[in-house]
Amino acid sequence: MHRHLRTDSTMERARERLAAGDPHGTVVIAEYQSAGRGRGADRSWAAKPGSSLLFTVLLRLETFASRSTPPPRFGLTPLVVGLAVAEVVEAWTAEPVRLKWPNDVYLRDRKLAGVLCQHRENAILAGVGINCNQRAFPPELERRAIALREARGGAVARYRLLGDILARLRAHLEREERFGPAMLAAVNERLYMRGCEVSFRSPEGEVLGGTVVEADGDGRLVLERGSGERHRYISGEILSGRP
Ligand code: BTN
């Protein structure tokens, strides 16, 4: 585990650890990031020092390949990481937590955490940012973001949260059936807006209407459109929806 009081992004530090030959399971944590990244080239992730849990886990694909089960499918990885976060937050709050495809964790209909997975060399760098102890958000995020503190009713021990999430993630990745039907079912049980009509921005930037069906075994969003035809998207964004 490598902890930085301040760095540009834990994704960069994890990339260095990967190049330096650090092992599977290496974790890089930051108390503050000056250039935290979100999913998509134009997105950043900003958090005041010490307010959030910010980390990146190095998952080496050869570690998986040496075992009997198949290696992680890249499209599913953010959902598995999100699932580990969701399960721990559910245990900590006794409240339902949702996975907003493809990489967000939602609590009380607001964004609690984001996951950013990058495929580098023979590894996946799984970055996670969780709002923990913020008492307020900037006006533009106020209605869309939530900190765990609000649901817990008090300060969050971020490193204990990290320990629980890593244990959960490890359990998922080490089980015989990882990335199998049980895990996918656990993701889909929590899928945000499942069965709801949503507007969706396709990878080409087109805004479409459709009903969220599920995430499939490759992590694609299955959207039912028009007269029942099903379309699968590897990227894109759910913009809004109603039950
Ligand atoms: C998103 O919501 O778009 C994904 C946000 C991911 C943020 C985390 S914070 C730790 C890691 N380092 C980064 O620069 N980004 C990820």
Image: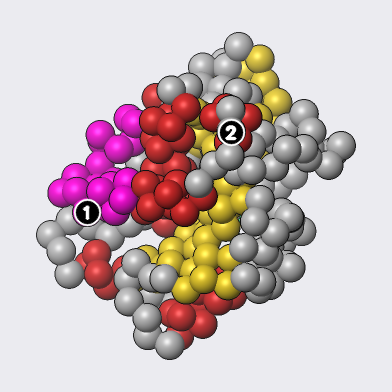
Q: Where residue 111 sits in the image (x, y, percent)?
A: 64, 36
| Residue reaching furthest to the front | 154
In the picture of the structure, the residue carrying the numbered disc 2 is: 154
Q: Quadrant of residue 109?
A: top right
Q: Which residues are magenta?
A: 167-188
Q: Which mark is residue 42?
A: none
Query: Is 8 contained in the magenta span?
Result: no
CA–CA distance in space, label 2 to label 1: 33 Å
Which SS type dominates the magenta stretch?
Answer: helix
Residue at position x 83%, y 42% from top?
138
In the picture of the structure, the residue carrying the numbered disc 1 is: 174
Residue at position x 67%, y 64% from top?
32
Callout 1: 10 Å neighbours few (<14), some, many (20+)? few
Q: Is residue 169 left or right of residue 52?
A: left
Q: Is residue 67 left or right of residue 78?
A: left
Q: Is residue 237 left or right of residue 213?
A: right
Query: Is 183 contained in the magenta span?
Result: yes
Applied colour scheme: secondary structure
Q: Quadrant of residue 113?
A: top right
Q: Amino acid at mark 1?
A: Glu
Local secondary structure at mark 1? helix
Quarter of the picture holding the C terminus: top right
